[in-house]
Every structure is written in structure tokens, then in C-alpha cells.
Amino acid sequence: MIIFNEKLKSKILFIFIITILSTNAIFANEPADFKDVPASYWGYKNIQRVYTDGVVSGTDYNEKTGERNFSPEAKLTMAQFTTILTRAFYADELAASTAGNEPDVKWYVATQDVCEKHNLTKGCSWTDAEYSSSRYQMARIMYNLLVDKGVTLPTEAEITAAQSKIADWDRIPENNKISVATVFAMGLITGKDDIGNFIGNDSVTRAEAATIYCRLVDVIANKDLSVQSKKHEVVQKEQIANSEVIDFTERITELVNEARKNNGLNEVFLDNELSQAAQSRASECVQKFSHTRPDGTKCFTILGEMAISYSYAAKNIAYGQKNADEVMEDWLNSPGHRANILNSHITKIGVGYTNIDGRIYWVQIFKD
């Protein structure tokens, strides 16, 4: 029997970890059943994709039980985020890098080497590489990646439109504005709350990073975003112009029930009175885009005014999306909104929307 003392065990574990983190080869994985990521988790599909693509692994694996964890709510560091990107978009260069061959170097030096060659981390400091990455930092890195890959960036008009959707735009530092507006306009990162605040100093979780990765891969695969947009431009213009005629209500209800069915939940039924309440709230959101009504009262007071009884209610709001599929995609990619859609207590849904100068305001109200 071999007995290891604690110091020797620590050294062996350290060497083992460095060996894993220093490996630059990328392998595709089979889908994994992460114990802490059930199929009902909002980021399940994106986590499966980032894992099967071989750019992110789980955080721990128990050989005896076969249990594997992803730690979706753990904070991501700049070193980890750039490792994801270099594995995805510069795999050959990462594998060929000799930067990690020297003794006593950081595990991410090969990633740093590739990033610096392509100016991906221009404006960022590697001194903070192992601290939680901020949304500002990630936006800047993604912007640099898009430039390096020759992706067609949003037009000036699209950038201006994006700025109008970012509630805390005036508080964003000047040196971060172009990168934030660009990734926001391209749908790579959205606001963190219902009113569209970017909150750039907030950190990013592993689940959020998986979602960002999937969006980024899709954008770069298309290369020319403007060309991709033009394919749908005529249809979208018609939908916006006729949004008062086109009934998005049925489609939103259909997509809500599709999501609920996929997560083992009961269907919800479209309720006319609830939809009238949602329609009133959509009109109010034009005046004040908030869960608080323009008169300062809470959002659910609309139900009392319309004599709609309830013991449980929930609500989602959004604006700027061009059609039902687009707004539902955004809601389902947001943990709080997704939780409302997949709430087990609800049985009825009301849908409201209004088009103001080509911008659509959307409201869902749910009740038991």
C-alpha cells in the first residue's frame, strides 16, 4: 500500500491541474448530463453546445458515481473567457503555441500569446486575468474578435438604435461605448434587467458565457451580418408596418406552450380579459418602460382595476423585437423571464403589444 503525505498529495494534485489546463488540443465531447444543469435550466441547450464543441468542460467529475457538474452560476474570469474564444476560433494557433512550454508560467499563457497576436485583449490588462471578468471587458474582447475575423459590423443607424435601448448608456465610460453598442446591436449581449440597463461592471457566469459563445459562433459563421439581415429585411418591415393587423398573440401563446411542454409543464390558455390588461400595460410601457405604472403604482394593480381575480401572477415586458419569435427567444434566454414562462403555478396567459413608429412594446401577463 502506498501512503502519500499531505504535501506530496498537494504537489501531485497541482501538477495534475496544470497538465489539464495547459492542454491545447480541442476535442468534441458527447452530450453530458450535468447534475447541476437540469433540462429545465434556462441555459441548458447552450451549455450542452459549448461542452460538445469541446471549448468548455465541467468543473468536476465523480468517477464512482458518474456525476458531473458544470457550476453554471460560477463567475468567469478573463483567462477562462479568452480560452473559450481561442479554442473556438484559433484552435490551430493555440495548439501550436510554445508559450506554455516554459516552467513556472501561468496556465493560460498560450491563450494570452494568441490573444495578443490578434489584438483580442487590446485595452484589457492580463494582470486581472484570474479575476471575474466584467461585461465591459467581455464586450471589448468580443468587439476585437469581430474586427479580427472581418465580420461586418452594425451600421451607424443600427448603433444609434442600440444606444437608445441601453437605459444606462449615459453612464457607460467613453472607452467602452463603441464595443458595448456593437455587441448589443448584434444581439451578443443584452441588458441585464427589464428596462435595458447594461450594468457593465457586473461579472458574467459560466452559463451566460455559454450563451454568449453560441451567439458569437453563429454570427461569425454567417460572417456578413448585414447580408444575413437583408434576407429577412422585407419580411420584417412588413411585420412591423402591419403589427397592428398581424396577430402575434396566438404565436406567442404557442411558443410559450412549446417551451412549457419541453419542460414537462402544463399548457396555459389564452385569456381575453388578461390580454386586455396586457394590452393596457403595453400602451403604458410606451410612456414608461418599467414594471411600475406611469402613475407610480405596481404593475399588477391593472388586474384589480379590471376585476381580474388571482392568487398568483407574473409579467414579462420587452421592446424593440420585430416579431413574436424574436421576443420569445429573448425572454427564454433571460433567466428571470424564462422563470415566469415556465412557472408551474400559472394556467392562463394574456398577451399585449403596440407598435409606435416601428418599435413594438410587448407584454405577457400570467395568472393561476
Image: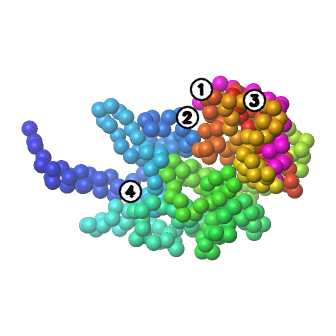
Give the residue at x 74% y 58%: 227
Which of pointers 4 and 3 lies earlier in the amino acid sequence?
4
> Viewer-proximal residue, 300 or 316?
300
Look at the picture and state if 305 lies above or below 108: above
SS for dot 2: loop
SS for dot 4: loop
Task: Please tell me whether mark 4 or mark 3 is closer to you in this view.
Answer: 3
Give the residue at x 64% y 56%: 191
- The type of residue carrying mark 1 is Gly
Q: Mark 4–mark 2 contact, CB under 8 Å?
A: no
Which of pointers 3 and 2 lies earlier in the amino acid sequence?
2
Separation (CA) of disc 3 from disc 2: 29 Å
Task: Please tell me whether mark 4 or mark 1 is closer to you in this view.
Answer: 1
Residue 264 has which mark? 1
Task: Please tell me whether mark 4 or mark 2 is closer to you in this view.
Answer: 2
Which of pointers 1 and 2 lies earlier in the amino acid sequence?
2
Q: Mark 3–mark 2 contact, CB under 8 Å?
A: no
Side of 129 relative to 85 (left or right): left
Side of 7 relative to 254 (left or right): left
Colour convention of the picture: rainbow
Mark 4 lies on residue: 24
Which of pointers 4 and 1 lies earlier in the amino acid sequence?
4
- The x and y percentages for residue 276 are 84, 37
Residue 309 has which mark? 3
> Viewer-proximal residue, 114 or 139?
139
